[in-house]
Image: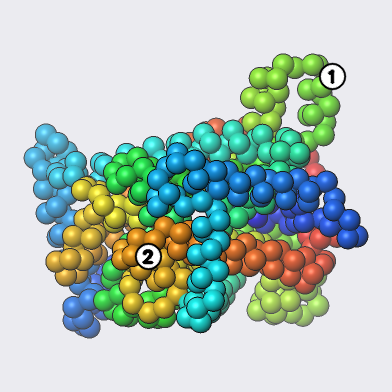
Amino acid sequence: MWITAGTGSASGPPDWLHYGSGVLSPAVARGAIGVAAFLAVGEVIGRIGLVARNYLPPTSDVFIALWRLMTTEDFGTDILVTTGNWLLGLATAVAIGVPLGLLLGSVPKLNEVSRLVVEFLRPIPSVALIPLAVLVFGTGTEMRVFVMTFAAVWPILFNTIYGLMEVDPLAKETARSYGSGRLGVVLRVSLPSAAPFVLTGVRLAASIALILEVTAELFGGGGRGIGTVVGVAIFGSGEKDVVLAGALVAGVIGLAANLAMEAGGRRSLVWAHQPGGGR
Amino acid sequence: MKTFLARWAVLAALVALWELATWRAENPFFPRPSAIAEVIQQRWLSGPPSQLFVSGIQEDVVPSLVRLLSGWAIAAVIGVSLGLALGRSSRLDDYLAPVLHFLRAVPPPALLPVFIVLIGLGSSMQLALIVFGVVWPILLNAADGARAVPATQVDTARVFRVSRAQWLLGVVLPSASPKIFAGLRISLSLSLILMVISEQVGSSDGLGRSLVDAQRDFSLRGMWAVIVLLGVLGYLLNSALLMVERRVLRWHLGSRAQAADTT
């Protein structure tokens, strides 16, 4: 599954992604039925007046609002800003989390001793840092990247450390006896063998970072992005259809990123997916 | 014992370093940790000895904790039961997976206004937001764990014709529990995030509210105090969960160790 905590199990894609040579497999058909039912329920609830229409607009209204947004040029910029910031935040988290994880994972003593500091820092909810970050960095990209990095670095760090602990000691000894230095062993043996775990961490981090990017846009104010559009609709115009359309777009971005990483991981980490290997 | 001392020594050393750095920098955005500690002491730890020196926590810490724990508990019940069902029925999984994966990808704060108009401002809105935000790791992990019940256990249960309740509670749930706990741990940190978010919008109490107040007063020390307190709170909650996990999963860890011994 997509949220596999720490265990880094390299399970395949969900069943509904198995397209059988162009023919609709039962799984895909069922998935489509599920989606259709979901949209239909949204439409019916909005129409029959179970809740006031301007409270929870029916599906069709949301899609009309989405169309309206899409046809304005600005919304394209907002999507680009959100996606760009998000990738930057994720990249920063990877650039900090993976080297730090390699260091802590290959020097167990350091890992032991720093445990407590990490345990105090990690649970601090990054949204609580937004007011402070706004004062220090302003409302722009820097603030958002800081907030995202603080939240997203932990799954990467922990999965990297965990992956390093699972490395086959025999492989490490072999590399060492062939004359690899400490760093050489880490880079040539440990990192490739821990890669599936690292990737799981990055995948987890990606969804967390997207949540934080949108939240930082919402609460930070200023700048551009999907969260800003939603924020204006929340605190200003009160158009719920725009709010839901924005949420829809953010959800689709997150879903697409997850699928891309899932596919990319399977392709680039082939060795880890052979029967009996990796894991 | 030695590592225990070393850990606290490293923490103390870093705090000392922090104190020194802020002392030298004299940046208004970064108050000294001793000043932050003073604020925490005045606000939350200046009570009479009869209350264990605790004070003023009824307005912010207690409501926050209640919200966080009840939201997390509700999410756990929903997540585990739906997750087990999805894990054991591939047909149900087929129907629901795309929708669930989409909902999971939606950033919960973006749905705040919808929750607000549907449920109104107040505690139930905050609960709903927390539940919606944290249910996914539990649900997906439970489904993953339920899917992976070892074939021998499935066959054994079938041979002995165990009842449905026994099958679910005695075979599937224990087998999925390591995964479920992993999901619960992720969700606990997420609950802390969503608790703060939900309290920043239309709440009259809680730590998120204190944060907003501090922000409005431009009280840097107040903000830092809330942040530090949240860190301590998260640490305590996490430690408690780990303790429970170690208890509940003792059989699992034990059998793991045994398996490792025999190989």
The residue nearer to you, when weighing A25 against A262, is A25
Residue B116 in the image: state x and y as whole percent: 35, 49
What chain is tagged by disc 2? A
> Which label belongs to residue A233?
2
Residue A117 in the image: state x and y as whole percent: 40, 61
Q: Residue at x 18, y 44 (%)?
A: B59
Which structural element holds mark 1?
helix
Q: Is residue A255 above or below residue A46?
A: below
**As drawn, which residue projects farthest toward the left?**
B48
| Residue type, label 1 | Val
Nearest to viewer (mark 2 / mark 1) = 2
- The residue pinned by badge 1 equals B159
Image quarter in which the C terminus of chain A is found? bottom right
Q: Residue at x 79, y 16 (%)?
A: B161
Label 2 CA crowd tier, 10 Å (few <14, some 14–19, many 20+): some
Q: Residue at x 17, y 49 (%)?
A: B44
The residue nearer to you, when weighing B14 against B215, is B215
Whether residue B202 is visible: yes
Q: Is residue A132 left or right of residue B168?
A: left
What chain is tagged by disc 1? B
Q: Is residue A94 above or below residue B126?
A: below
| Residue type, label 2 | Ala
Whether residue B115 is visible: no
Q: Is residue A130 above or below residue B141?
A: below
Q: Is residue A58 left or right of residue B223?
A: right
Q: Is residue B111 left or right of residue B140?
A: left
Which structural element holds mark 2?
helix
